[in-house]
Amino acid sequence: MCYNFSRKEGTFMKKSLLALCLLFSCSSLISCGEYEYVSTLPQHDRTAWFNEEELNKVGLSSLPAPTGLEGDVNSDVYWFNDGYSFSQSCPNQEVLNTNATTYLNYFKSHYDKAFGTSTSYKYGSDVTYYYISVKNDVSAYYDDNPSPLYKFYYVTDTTLAEDGCLKEDAVWSLEIRYELNSTKNTYDFKLFIENESKNHNNTFQYKYNLK
């Protein structure tokens, strides 16, 4: 059977076929692009503690996993400021305190005098300057805002920049918290590792010196 199409109908069909071809091509490219992008991301087991390669990247080789916790682990290598996050159910605050002592001992043995608490000493319009001071008593690292926590600053490179401060990206922090999980009405142990050179919005800069 033979069909005769008018010029207008023929033109319409050609345009429709062309549009379908373009749509198929774009969809294929997007799918391929998404596949390639996902496949190049570092793979991380979100149900486990960080592996040695991941810990090395943030200057915490051989950092032990927290102990005394319960239930499922939730960890991630995509947190603020190139950092990591970790959470697991925590039976009581004493577990937080015990782990804080473990991490203080870790910094004492791995970072000598290149770790401590931070104290601000000068302010600029978009920068704050801090001293990092070693404290041997774990209570010096404790705070209760926004929840019971311990925060340790550590220095991965003690070389000074031209302005006399530690190089950018040289200062990191490890923070552990005992925090209410309002969904489950239980408490979680939370751990955060962050680069401390800027705030979370990257609008304010922090500079440091060892004291």
Image (cartoon, rainbow, N blue to C red):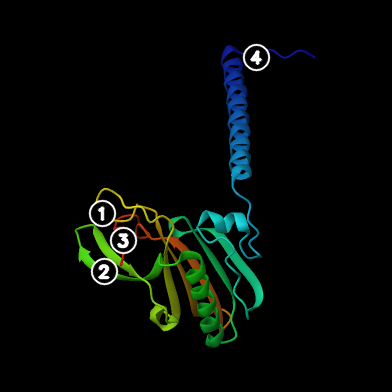
Q: Is residue 31 visible?
A: yes
List the residue tagged with mark 2.
Answer: 120
Upstream in sequence: badge 4 or badge 1: 4
List the residue tagged with mark 4.
Answer: 5
Task: State the separation of the CA atoms marked 2 and 3.
Answer: 9 Å
List the residue tagged with mark 1.
Answer: 164
Task: State the separation of the CA atoms marked 3 and 4.
Answer: 78 Å
Q: Quadrant of the N terminus?
A: top right
Q: Residue at x 52, y 86 (%)?
A: 93
Neighbourhood count class around disc 1 (C-alpha, 10 Å): few under 14, some 14–19, many 20 upward? few
Left or right: residue 10 compared with residue 118: right
Q: Amino acid at mark 2?
A: Ser
Observer-nearest of 141 and 49: 141
Task: State the separation of the CA atoms marked 4 and 1.
Answer: 81 Å
Task: State the separation of the CA atoms marked 3 and 1.
Answer: 9 Å
Location of residue 186 with respect to 127 vertically, above or below: below
Q: Residue at x 62, y 58 (%)?
A: 52
Q: Secondary structure at mark 2?
A: strand
Q: Amino acid at mark 4?
A: Phe
Upstream in sequence: badge 4 or badge 2: 4
List the residue tagged with mark 3.
Answer: 208
